[in-house]
Image (cartoon, grey):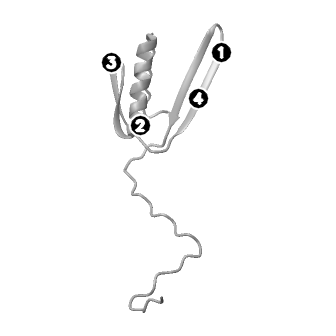
Amino acid sequence: MKDLKFEQKTSLSRLEAADQLTALAAALREGGETDVELGPVTLTMRIPDELRSEFEVEVGDGEIELEIEFKWPIATAEAAPSAPAAPSGRRRPAKRGAAKKS
């Protein structure tokens, strides 16, 4: 079972479709907690810096179907940024009170 599913099917002009894609692109560019206006509906969601994508085109039955899909995990709380790993072979810091070698 899905936690939430939003689906909107409607007929759009080419310019209206472009406006919706522009709104989505702006939300992706902004990232973080953002609003996406899709016609009469506004979705508020958190968009992380990294996500997975799928681009699919199907031609058949006299139609072209274009699907653009983005996926990312749901985060219940903002994770603290992790400290970068020390490169291997790096020296340990001098013990407290020890003299520094030059």
What kind of residue is marked 1?
A: Val
- Helix, strand or loop at label 3? It is loop
Q: Position of residue 24 (x, y in %)?
A: 42, 29
Say which residue appears at 41% left-offset and 25% top-offset.
22
Q: Earlier in the sequence, mark 2 or mark 1?
A: 2
Where is mark 2, residue-wise?
29
Residue at mark 2 to residue at mark 1: CA–CA distance: 30 Å
* Labels 4, 2: front one: 2
Which one is closest to the eye, mark 3 or mark 2? 2
> Which of the two marks, 3 or 4, is nearer to us in this view?
4
Element assignment for label 4: strand
Q: Which residue is mark 3?
A: 40
Q: Which type of secondary structure does the marked residue at label 2 adopt?
A: helix
Q: Nearer the viewer, residue 54 or 16?
A: 16
Q: In the rendering, at what x and y percent does residue 45 appear?
A: 37, 36
Q: Position of residue 29 (x, y in %)?
A: 41, 37
Q: Which residue is labeled 1 in the image? A: 59
Measured along the vertical axis of the image, is residue 6 above or below residue 71? above
Mark 4 = which residue? Answer: 55
Above-or-below relation of 24 to 29: above
Q: CA distance from mark 3 to mark 2?
A: 22 Å
- Residue at 45% across, 85% down: 94
> Does 95 appear above or below 52?
below
Among numbered discs 3 and 4, the one appearing first in the sequence? 3
Upstream in sequence: badge 3 or badge 2:
2
Q: CA distance from mark 4 to mark 2?
A: 18 Å
Q: Amino acid at mark 4?
A: Phe
